[in-house]
Amino acid sequence: MDITVVVGAVLFLILVVLAWLTVRRLRALRSGGVHAALRTRLDPSGKGWHLGVGRYQGDEFVWFRVLSLRPGPDRVIHRSTLEIADRRDPSGSELYSMPPASRVLRFSDSGRATEPHIEIAMSPDALTGFLSWLESAPPGRLPWAS
């Protein structure tokens, strides 16, 4: 087999993967998505953040990682299990792994025993919308808000 055929096939596969990632991200953003970084492991050094696009679907916040080939969401977060544990500004190396001017919310997620904490970083505008969504549950649906 000629080397140019192999190189051409590899380049074509790379192009297809990049096109898939681009289409996936644009679909998520056009259907009401917001840029958000998420991490599920608390690490004092600032590691573990993943960029993505979040979208509201009823009582769920679905999050799509930017560099993922999965057709569905990478994480589904239910509104009824979230409780804000802390708010802070990003520090140190975290500044490079999240949207500009982000605020970080740390949640205590009582619905997951294996992942007790989730952190989400969003821009101020996206954060305002997220907090409005979080607090807009019907009466009695959020036990901590009653």
Image: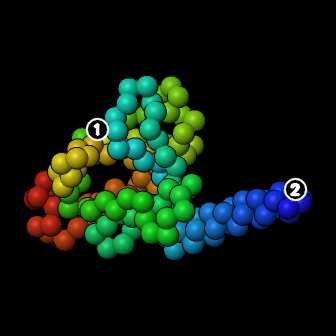
Residue in the foreground of this view, choosing between 56 and 64: 64
Marks 2/1: CA distance? 55 Å
Residue at point 51%, 74% (across, down):
31
On residue 25, the disc is: none
Viewport quadrant of the N terminus = bottom right
Badge 2: how crowded within 10 Å, few (<14), some, or many (20+)? few
Q: Which residue is mark 1?
A: 86
Left or right, 62 with reference to 5 = left
Disc 2 is placed on an element classified as helix
Q: Please indicate, yes or no, whether residue 41 appears anywhere in the rendered image.
A: yes
Q: Please indicate, yes or no, whether residue 105 appears anywhere in the rendered image.
A: no
Left or right, 61 with reference to 54 = left
Q: Amino acid at mark 2?
A: Ile
Residue 136 picture quarter: bottom left
Residue 96 picture quarter: top right
Q: Which residue is mark 2?
A: 3
Residue at point 26%, 62% (across, down):
79
Q: Amino acid at mark 1?
A: Asp
